[in-house]
Every structure is written in structure tokens, then in C-alpha cells.
Amino acid sequence: MHRTPRPRLRGPAAALAAVALLGGVLTTGATAQAAPRTDGRLTDLVNPFIGTQNEGNTYPGASVPFGMVQLSPDTGHNTGYDYGENHIRGFSSVHLSGVGCGLGGDLPTLPTTGDVTETDYAKYAAEFSHDDEKASPGYYRVGLKTGIEAELTATQRTGVQRYTFPATDKANVLLNAGQSLHRTLSSKVEILDNHTVRTAITGSGFCQDTKPYTVYTVTHFDRPFATSGTWNGDTVTEGSKQSSATDARNGAWLRFDTTKDRTVEATTALSYVDAKGAALNLRAEGGHTFDHAERAAQRTWEERLEGVKAQGGSDELRRTFYSSLYRSFLAPNVGSDVDGRYTGWDQKKHRANGFTYYQNWSLWDTYRTQAQLLSLLAPRESRDMAISVLRIDAESGWLPKWGYGTVETNIMTGDPVTPFLTNAYQQGLLKGYEEEAYRALKKNADGVPATDSAPVGREANVEYLKDGYAPYIKDRPHAKPGDSDYDHGASATLEYALSDGMLAEMARDLGHDADAARYDARAQNYRKIFDASTGFFRARDASGAFTGPADPAQSEGFHEGTSWQYQWMVPQDIPGMVGLIGGKDAANQRLDSFFAYDKLLADPAKTAREVWVNGPYAYYNADKYNPQNEPDLIAPYTYLSTGQPWKTTDVVHAALTLFTNGPTGMTGNDDLGTMSAWMVLSSIGVFPVQPGTDTWGLSTPAFERVDIKLDRRYYPRGSLTVSAPGASDTDRYIQSARLDGAQQSRTYLTTDDIRSARSLSFTVGSEPSAWGTSPEDAPPALG
């Protein structure tokens, strides 16, 4: 989602148990680099600084795959870290990769020296230089200009810090409970003993005010602090043991004597349930030295990355590929504590039985790429993620749209949860939950949440079901916080129709034939907003009249895009859409214009950077491909349906040049792994062209060989090798393809193909061929 931004812990095990009870790589053009390794591990190739500049909104700090904790520096940017800044306000425990609005940043923690006089982290922030900063998966280190070295690592539910101070009797650690990346409504800090601090932080916001949520933390130090205190507003009080505040600065400070022992280690555990949950998480995952935790995090990441082994390609490509693969595993995030408890969207405590509960759902983004990548590479976690979404429906009454923590934000539009869950179903991840999922999806597709409930759901569904389109109603008052489908009626119609097409497939599979026919018919509603006078989709008002500019390069009625960009977002029926605009020849002419294809052939990288991309948030009023935003992610694969599949490879490989090994190397916001997953899938050459189904479009891989390890529980063969010997910038056109040695003329695979095959091999050459050009080779329309 893109939004313009306005030695062992020395406290003994008994102490940790007591705490539980108390709760009842190298970059280009810059000097920051991935932490150096010497043993050729895949983690060596990952550069966590990619996307930290020019609004990629990623973070360089420490986490483990899908971890609850993302311990990372905050420099003042609204989403956390900006490579262009040179002061760190604190190392906070919650971040989401690539979000477009400020959220998280809870409990920024900063080591300082001297007297504690400032309570605003913008004032006590520490200067640093990228010359003295390194990061790798699960590890971050920086030398502060104050003479302090800070190191970060993480477990699933804890963040571990190690601070090396100069020799001083005034070495401080500041725990700031009252400031974050979003609005902090209230906070409470408690110094429990001379090793331990507990906080409760209630916050709100993500692009606007939302219902509040609370995160609980407990921090345990490896050595006793000599003295301590709290602050409230501007007042610093030595010896104070607790402080509470509402909409005000609030925190605790701990002082150590480092004249002899200069190192302080601390572990912070989180819980979204209660203080007891944070303490249990600390007891289960704490109690180890920093070095032990860092080694475990690195091993975890290495095992995860080893699931995909790529051969060939340039060093730059390998680094950007594995960095993208790394970011694809950063979210969604574990939301349940070690005892299985979690806070549901009804704000009540529940227990996950037989699954891990996950949270943070950027569904408008992730349903297009990341959900499918995780279904391949992390199916067990993907299963639990899908079940978690069903728990949201069971506990709050409705499926989510864009969920953060324990609340709905209603950011973005359409019906993204439907293709997310139908994808899980089609990939075999919902065994035993099929009918429960279908009932939730049917309710969501056919209704509208009540006015007193937080979600907006399909907000314009009454009109859509009656007239076949969501009306565009300019300046309509918002009934609930968040985005409104009425503000983007044309694109909302396309999103609804896409979801209807995916739901029809699921209904048909489950034997709900009447529903399938009904949803099939609704999947054709994209036709209702086609303006024959312009040859493009266009918004309609409540009376049915086309409204807004007739120029398809204008954005009115479309969410973060234009009609030019949304015209290809009909994956349920590309042949029907092609027919509307005059057939394959007309469609290919329009596609060529859209991608500036002649310029692309002459200079792919220059076309990508100067014609396609015009700024990090340049979504509006354009007639060209925008590879950095979600509505266009499927567009290059449209050529598979128009008889010119080689052009898909041309466009995809040009777009891949936008991913580079430096702070500006992310194209657009990463959106919880969406853009990264696009890069990974497109580099492999297997892409979900019909999100929400089991159809995977094919293009030439960027590597000569990719070996993918698959979970035998879901993919009995256990692996898939995709190969294209000799593939290069010049020899990039598919001449023929084979699936387990058998000729593969189709430009797509199904998930069953992937389950049954061990190899997909391409023969490539320097000129386009007739491969995949027959009408029967194209991905089929649904229904």
C-alpha cells in the first residue's frame, strides 16, 4: 500500500521466572554496508539498507522471519529509518517493512551518557555516520558519535540489545514509552527491580486515527543498574519507580557504572495480550547472551534463504534477489504469545489451538504477489496466516481489509481479502477450513458491515449488487476512519469484480453451483464501467452517468492510478477485456504504448527510470506503466494473453533493473514484502497472473537455474528446478519449454503442475519465437 506521507545474561534464570510472575551487504553509492561474513552464506548477499531512502520505507534493524519484534533504529522519518538522516532517536521494537504511513516505533530505547535532562527524543537523539553502521539478517550495529556502540538482534518475540559504553559512571539507557511513530495515547512505565522495567503503551493511527491498541513490554538487563528514575513531560525524577501519562512524554532511565565493565545487555519482550504475556515471552525466549541470540537469528535466516538457490546472473542481481527474498519473509507477524494467547479484533483474549496466530494484513498489496510466494516457500506459516484471518471474522464479525495489530485501519479499497483467502484455498492451505472460509467470504461478498462495526468491508456493495458498479461520489463524508470505496468507485468496481471471479472458482470447487453462477456473472461487472466513447474504464456516478475527466490518463475515480493503469487489472477475464478494446491487435498496440515498448527495446533501464518512474509517489495522471505500485504488478503478463509472450519478458526484465543494491534500490514502498515478492517471482520466471487462483504465468528467468525447496506436506515431490541455460540480457527469449521433459507450450502452469513436477526448463535465444503464441497457450479466463 502506497500512501503519500504527510557473556550470558547475568540475571539468573530465577530472576526471569520472577519477572514472568510479576506480569501476573554492501550498498552502492554509500558507506553503510551489510555486516561482513567470510563463509559464503546466503545471508552475506542480503543488504537490509535497500529501500531505506527515497520512500522505500524499509528498516535495516534486526528481526527473524515473521517475528513479533523488529528492533530497528528510528531517525525521524514517519515510518522509522531514513538513510538521509544522521541522528538516531532510539531503537524501537515494532516496524513494518515498506508501509506508507507512520505506525509502530513503540518503546524507542537509546543509550546515552551524562545527566538525563532532555525527555524529547528529537532533542536527545544521537548523531551517527553510515561509515560506522552495518547490518545483516538478524543483526544491526552502529557507532554513535557519543562514543557508544549499539548492537541489535532478535528472537521471535524479543529484541536483544548490547551497548558498549565509554568508561563512565553515568552510562544511561532511556526507555521512551511516550513517543513513537504514530500517536501514543497513553503509557505507563514501572521499574520493578534493579534489573527490570515494564511498560504498557496504547497507541492509535495509520494514515489516520484508528481504534487504539496496547502493546506490553518487559525489559530485563544483564546487570543491576546503579540508579534509575522516570520522566513525565519535561520533569525528570531520580528514584521514581513508576510514571503514567496521557498524550505526553513518559519514560524510564536506568544508569550503569561502566568504568570497569563497559558492556550492558538487555532483552525486551513484547505481548499484545497483557504484562503476563510479555513476561512469559521473556522467560521462554530470553536468558541467553547477545552473541547466542545473534547466532540463532542468523542460522534461522540462512535456513530460510536456502529454500531458494539461484545460479548465474550478476553479483548485483544475486544481491538484490536475496535481499528481496529476505524482505518477503518479514510479515505478517506473529501475534500470539508463547502460551498461545492473543488479543482478537473483538479486543478479547483468545488462545490459538493448533496454529500460530498472525497479525498485520496489508492485503490490498500482498494478495497480488507475497501471499503466493509464501504459499510456495512457507506453506505451514501461510496456513496459519489464513486461519488467523478466519479468526478475525469469527471474533469481530467481518474479514479484514488492512489490519494492524489488533485493529482494522480500513486503509485502501476494494475487497482484497477474497483473493487472499481463495489463494490459500487453491494452494491447499485450508484443508478442514474450506466451508468456514467460504461462509466468511460469502458474507463479505454479499453484505456490508454495520455502521457500529469498525470495518468498512465492501462499502459500496449495496449499489454494486443493485447496479453492477460502485459509484464514484466525490466528497462524500466518510462514515468510518480510513479510505472509502466511494472515493474510488471505478477501481473499487474492478477490485470487487476480480474478487467475485476468484470466489466463483472456490464456490464451484465446493459444489455451491448456484453461488458460482452468481459470482461468475458479477465477475463481468468490469464491463459496466467501460466507456465505449473513450475505449477505457471510467467512473460512474450514482445516477449511472460517466463522470470525471474523459482523459484516461487522469486519476479521478481510481485509487492510486489511472484508467490506463487499471485497464489490465481484469485477471479473471483478460480475453473479455481484450475484446472490449478491439481485439488482440488493438490490445497489443495499447500495451506497446503503455510500456513505451520501442524505447524499452532501445534502452530498457533508461526507459524504466525515466519514462515509467517519475517519483516515489507518482501514481496519478499518467498513461504509462508504473512498476512501483500495486495496480500494475500483473500488467506485464497481459502479453501472455495477447499472443506476444516474449514482450512479457522484455518488460519484466526492464522492471527488474529498478531493484538495485543501495538505499534507493527499492521501487516504491515495499508494502510488507509485496514489491520484493514481485521481484523474486519475476526473477524465477513463475508469477501469479490470476491472484486468488492456482494459475502461474511464465516468463524467462533472470537466472540460469533456480532450485526451490518445497514442503513435502504440500508439494510431494519436495522441490522444483527452474532452468534456462545461457539466459542473459541478449538471450532472453523462450524458444521452447519442458515440464519434466514434456513439451510445455502453454504460457502458464497450475499449482498441480508444480506439485507433480520436478523441473521446468527453458531453451532461450536472442530472438522471439512462436512459443506460447497460440490462443490455447494463454492463461484461460475463469468461469
Image (cartoon, rainbow, N blue to C red):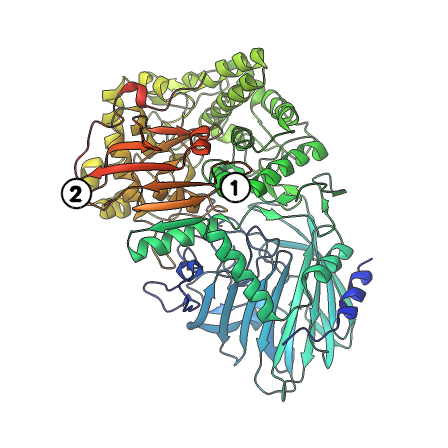
- Residue at left 79%, top 65%? 17
> Is 574 above or below relative to 161?
above
Which residue occupies the foreground of this view, 36 or 525? Answer: 36
Q: Secondary structure at mark 1?
A: loop
- Disc 1 or 2, which lies upstream in sequence? 2
Q: Which residue is mark 1?
A: 711
Q: Position of residue 236 (x, y in %)?
A: 71, 74
Q: Quadrant of residue 402?
A: top right
Q: Quadrant of residue 268?
A: bottom right
- Tell me whether the residue at label 1 lies in contact with that at label 2, contact meaning CB atoms closer than 8 angstroms: no
> In this view of the protein, can residue 529 be seen by the observer?
yes
> Is 582 above or below relative to 590?
above
Q: Position of residue 437 (x, y in %)?
A: 63, 27
Q: Secondary structure at mark 2?
A: helix
Q: Position of residue 464 (x, y in %)?
A: 53, 19
- Residue at left 50%, top 19%? 542
